[in-house]
Amino acid sequence: RAVPVPVRAVDTTSRSEARTAAEPTPSATPSEASGEALAASEPAEAGTTEDVAPTPEPTADDAFVGGSWADAFGTVTGTQFAQKALEVRAQSGDGAAVLGKLASGDKVSVTDKVVDGWTQVAFNSQVGWIRSELLGAKAPVKEAPKEAAGGSGQATARTSGKLQWPTAGSIGSRWGMRKHPILGYTRMHGGVDIGGRVGQPIYAAEDGVVTKAAHGHNSGSGNNVRIDHGKLSGKSVETAYLHMSKISVKAGQKVRRGQVIGTVGNTGLSTSPHLHFSVYLNGANSNPAPWLG
């Protein structure tokens, strides 16, 4: 009688996998390899975002077309004159790089930016900085001849009868009787109000000596400066500057015509930033208008 022989099951799947693993993977053809390398080197698409050309930086020349610059620049407010030979700096500060030089009397366009006593200017299509005290609204006047030997050694008084405008701007309120905008009643307005912005430079109207530099309310005058100019056109002349935001001089200090003595403000009894400018002839308050050049 035949005896049945047990049959052992064989796992053909395992052998197939082992055989497959043992077989070498075919290498990519040269054309396939170069295609994959090219794809890897190409940048990924930026989706639906379109490429935008960068906005060009504004130049100083652009400023004068529209009257203003980008945020990095100020707004051109006009021109001023170098009161002496000076250097134009790339930034505010004596340690900044020198862009060039101006001779005494050279004219330069200025902006409304003033930083720590430095005024921003347009210089050879570049943005430069000049010490505010070295700029003036008018070209400097040549020194009057000295007295003969044995004299005082001081320059003789100028006889033009004209003072430098103390700040940029136009007259908003004139000298004379008027209704006070705050107090509400009519009284004497002893000067002219020149509109401006806070921080705008104020200049000495003529050579002289500071006799007053007062901070505080001062009965409505606010921060104010008074300068004695000595004799002009045969009269003793003094000038006063009221409502200042900053005073840059002190009592007893000698100043020159066009020198920065402080900045426009809104201190004291004032409704908006401006400079109240007064003239005193032989000690009496007088109309400044005839004295302004």
Image (spheres, rainbow, N blue to C red):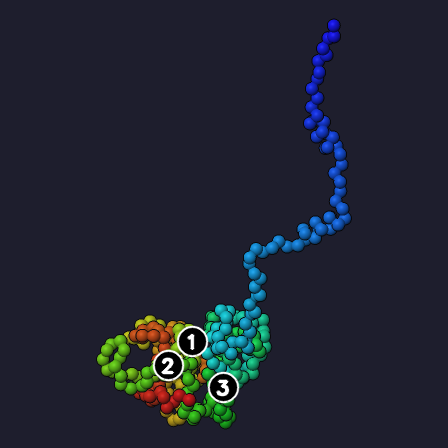
Q: What numbered label is drawn on residue 200?
A: 1
Can see residue 241? no
Query: Of the residues shown, which amino acid type is indicated by label 2?
Result: Ile
Query: Of the residues shown, which amino acid type is indicated by label 3?
Result: Ala
Residue furthest to the front in view is 1
Query: Of the residues shown, which amino acid type is indicated by label 1?
Result: Gln
Horizontal side of 196 relative to 19 (left or right) equals: left
Separation of disc 1 and disc 3 at Cα?
19 Å
Give the residue displayed 71% in from the left and 29% down from the top.
Answer: 16
**Helix, strand or loop under label 2:** strand
Residue furthest to the top in view is 1
Give the residue displayed 40% in from the left and 73% down from the top.
Answer: 198
Q: Which residue is mark 3?
A: 139
Give the residue displayed 36% in from the left and 88% down from the top.
Answer: 289
Residue furthest to the left in view is 185
Separation of disc 1 and disc 2 at Cα?
11 Å
Can see residue 36? yes
Separation of disc 2 and disc 3 at Cα?
21 Å
Quick one: 72 or 228, which is closer to the camera? 72
**Residue 4 sits above or below residue 224 on the image:** above
Q: What numbered label is drawn on residue 194?
A: 2
In this rendering, the label closer to the viewer, 2 or 3: 2
Disc 1 residue crowd, few under 14, some 14–19, many 20+, Cα 10 Å: many
Q: Quadrant of the C terminus?
A: bottom left
Instruction: Give the number of callouts.
Output: 3
